[in-house]
Each structure stands twice: as structure tokens, then as C-alpha cells.
Image (tube, rainbow, N blue to C red):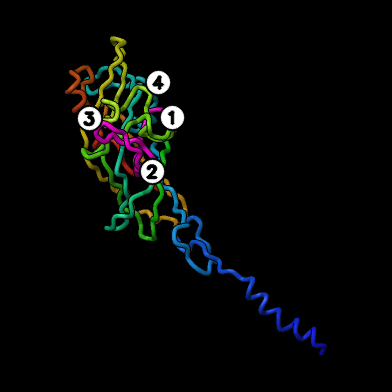
Amino acid sequence: MPRSLLLFLVLIPLLAASCYEDNIACLDLDATNYDILADQSCSDCCVYPTFSMDVDRFWADSAFLATDVYPDGAGNEIRVLNFRVYLTELELVAGNELLPTPVNEIEVGVVSGSDTVLTDFNANLVLLNTTGSTTSTVGRLSVGETALTQVQGRLGMAEDFPAIVPSSAPATSPLSTQEGLLNFNDGQGYLTASAQYLLVATNDTVRIDLYNSEPFVLDFPVPEAPERGEDLTLEFAADYREVFGTIDLTEDENTVADGIFEGLKNWLMVTGAR
């Protein structure tokens, strides 16, 4: 065999070995970019699925429409023009274990003394509305294999919620400045909810703002096994009759606000997942 050919045959494996590079990628089965061909796990490249809420609106057993007239608890005809509610600190429970907090990091301005400091903030929250899209994204998280049993969170903001300046939040964030303002004393706090309804008999439009805050826990009707590495959407039913159809909406503002807040505790229920 010619010496040149022999040398070539010896060099081929060496050249191949020198050109090979380890495939460093995500090896977490719960990530959307899991790479079965990876040789080595990356340190921070994994992207986890989104957790979203899809809320269908009802009045008792019928679909709720903001254009329809409904009776309140005293028989007064009303139209619910808009009802907006903040749900915060949203997390999932699988079996008896609390899953990692969903991550939806945004940069906002937070009031610190006389200054506003730009701060990274995890906005794992949603703002539910009477009109518009029924689906809201909470954040990204690793769900694992255990069946989901509960979703928990808070109606409104906790007392130690940072003093965010709404105008500093991204326009797509629920914390941004909203039409008909859902923040009071700009940079000092947010409402829990705001209800606007029409009293048909008098043609008066009433707005009621709520400031109460309280944790909640919602059970799944049956445990739901998640699809690993797939986006998760929880389905909810919101019964507006629980909020507006059990109280006299012609009462004074404080009485109505208390009644609406009580109704909120039974307003939502989990109906499934997809």
C-alpha cells in the first residue's frame, strides 16, 4: 500500500474526532425545547411551557353577555357593563405538592422613597374582564408528571405588593395603566376589582371599586395529568350571577362592594385543562 494512502487512512479518524463537538442542549423532559439528541445538559437554555387561564362567562346556566339584561338579588333589572378582577400569586398544586411559581418577569418602576427604581418583577397574575379575550397567560413553569389538583392565588394584591408605577409596566401587562384606571394614587396601589353596571329603571351607570384582598383555593373537578413539555391551559367558568344576582345593587356603595366581594369567593370554578 502506498505510504501516502496509509497516512491518509490513519488521519481520517483523527480528523473526524477533532471536528466533533458535544451537543449541549436542554435535557429536561418538562421543557418545550427538550433535545433527545443532546450529549450534555445546558445550564440555562431550557424553555418551559406557558400556563394560561381560559375563562368562560356565565349567568347561572346560560352564557353571559354584557349586552343582556339580568335581575339582581332584589329583582332590579341591570346590565353589567364591565367587571374587572385581579388574580395574583397564581400557582398550581399537583397531588399535595405546590409546583414552582410561574415565571413572567417584566421590568417595572417601583416607588422607593422619592425615587422610582427600575426593578425586575415576576408578574404571575391576570386581569379578568367582562369583554375581550377569555384567555390570559400567567407565566411559564415546569409541571412534571403528577396530576394537577388545585390552583391557588389571591383576589387582588397582597398588602406588601410593591408600589409599581402602572405607566412604567409594559403595555401588554395587566399592571399597565388601564382604561378607567384600576390603580389609585399612581404608584401606591391597585384595586382588587372594579364593577360598572347600568340600573335599567333609572338609566344610571354605577361604578363600584373593591380594595379587599384575600387568598383563594380552587379544586379541580378531577385530577388532571399534564402533558410534559406542552403548554397548559386551565379552563374556568365565571358565574356572574354569584356576584351581581344575589345582592341589591341599588344599596349604598359600601354595602354593594361588600356583597360583590363575597360573591367573588364563589365566582370561579375550574372545569378542566387542555
Instruction: Kindly tell me whether residue 241 is visible in this rendering.
Output: no
Instruction: Kindly tell me whether residue 193 is visible in this rendering.
Output: yes
Structural crowding at the residue carrying mark 4, measured as other residues with C-alpha within 10 Å and reported as few (<14), some (14–19) or many (≥20): few
Under tag 1, what secondary structure?
Answer: loop
Q: Which residue is mark 1?
A: 132
Residue shown at the point (31%, 32%) measured from the top left? 85
Give the mark nearest the N terminus, 1 or 3.
1
**Marks 2 and 1 in Cβ contact (< 8 Å):** no
- What separation in Å lies between label 1 and label 4 (alpha carbons)? 13 Å
Residue 211 image label: 3
Residue shown at the point (30%, 50%) measured from the top left? 150
Q: Is residue 79 left or right of residue 74?
A: right
Front position among marks 2 and 4: 2
Structural crowding at the residue carrying mark 3, measured as other residues with C-alpha within 10 Å and reported as few (<14), some (14–19) or many (≥20): some
Q: Which residue is mark 4?
A: 67
Front position among marks 2 and 1: 2
**Marks 1 and 3 in Cβ contact (< 8 Å):** no
